[in-house]
Amino acid sequence: MKLSERLARLGTETAFEVLVRARALEDQGRSVIHLEIGEPDFDTPAHITEAAIEALKGGATHYGPSAGIPELRQAVAEDSRARRGVKATPEMVVVTPGGKPVMFYTILALIDPGDEVLYPNPGFPIYESMIRYIGGIPIPVRLLEDRAFELDVDQLVNRVGPKTRLIVINHPHNPTGGGIPESGLRAIAEVAARHGIPVMADEIYSELLYEGRHVSIASMPGMEPHAIILDGFSKTYAMTGWRLGYGIMPAPLAEVVAKLQTNAVSCTATFTQKAGVAALKGDKEPVKAMRDEFRRRREAIVSGLRKIPGFNCPQPKGAFYVFPNIARTGYSSKMLADRLLDEAGVAALSGTAFGEWGEGHLRFSYANSLENIEEALRRIKDLLAK
């Protein structure tokens, strides 16, 4: 069976590969502390789960509109207006099975072979994977480690050219937990508006910010016809397995994205969308409690990693990841990640899983208990002391 040539350009998400390896070691009786996978270790809040159960009992088991049920599209629009200050309408919302389809559909809708897309590096690996798969040219933009991994906005602005068709930003940022200051967002918005370039803002971690408030580039002057927001329920409401995300974009693009969804998956499961309505309109105390706990874990893991010889760890501003520099240990990123898993039972990701500029770093997710984080730090220190 001959596969298409473009499949050779398709990347992957290493976190799932490392998870498989870690589970295999556990099946052999080994103890593994999971700091590799990016999902909250909390249960979905009970009122959200109950809403899904009631929806199933009520018969919400049939096809729905490709763009999402009206009730959820309205709730997303209202939430966007309240939380982001963005004038969204239901016609601008497309509900998807997870956040990744928003990336895929957007790139598929906007990029032709040879078009350039600016994206953060190190960054979520699916950005580059999808750009290459479609035939676009990925143009990486560095993150500034000496500024706690802020996006290098000056570099981004200077890399905008006649072939630029899309800018991708992400803040808080995976894998570093870094962000983009409001002044940086304004600079990006200004160049995007001036050249008529769409900006896809991955804001999946926008509710997991530890200081200040999250500012969306969609709220910047001139961005109304250019902003595409990617968000969802996985991280904020501990709903990774529910596969529920959404995009907010200009209505004409939303129609195209809904058409792509019709061709790909028909629609998002109706009962999960009912749960999404309950999440947006219900009690937010579980979100605050989860964020507060992540803040405590952040302090513990940053403090612990800074005490390990050879490690330097900037403090993340959001999400639930740290991205320490391990260059002074003498190991490459992949070599140390492999040794930590195989010898110490600590599952982490090589920085190179997030792009070539991730070399010299590891990514640890602190979506695990304080007890397990402390044990992981002990194991890391013991391994490097050998």
Image (spheres, helix red, strand yellow):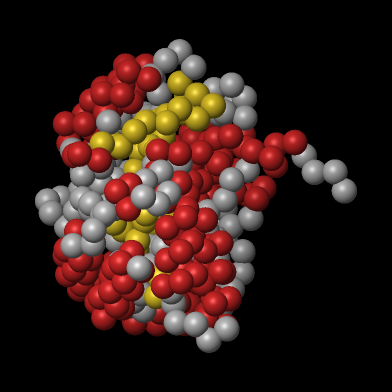
> What is the total number of numbered labels drawn onto the structure image?
0
In this rendering, is residue 109 above or below 229?
above
| Residue under the point 37% across and 31% down | 141
The x, y position of residue 321, in whole percent, is 31, 58
Q: Is residue 3 above or below residue 379?
A: above
In the picture, the quarter occupied by the C terminus is bottom left
Q: Farthest residue toward the top?
A: 162
Residue 110: image location, x then y, percent? 53, 30
386 left or right, relative to 60: left
Residue 37 visible (yes or no)? no
Q: Nearer the viewer, residue 81 or 142?
A: 142
**Extreme-right residue of the structure:** 1
**Is 161 above or below relative to 293?**
above
Q: Residue at x 50, y 24 (%)?
A: 116
Which of the 4 quarters of the picture holds residue 23?
Answer: bottom right
Residue at x 33% of width, y 64% of height = 384
Residue 122 falls in image quadrant: top left
Residue 120 visible at all? yes
In this view, the residue in front, 37 or 287, is 37
Q: Residue at x 23, y 62 (%)?
A: 308
Would you say 24 lies left or right of 185 here? right
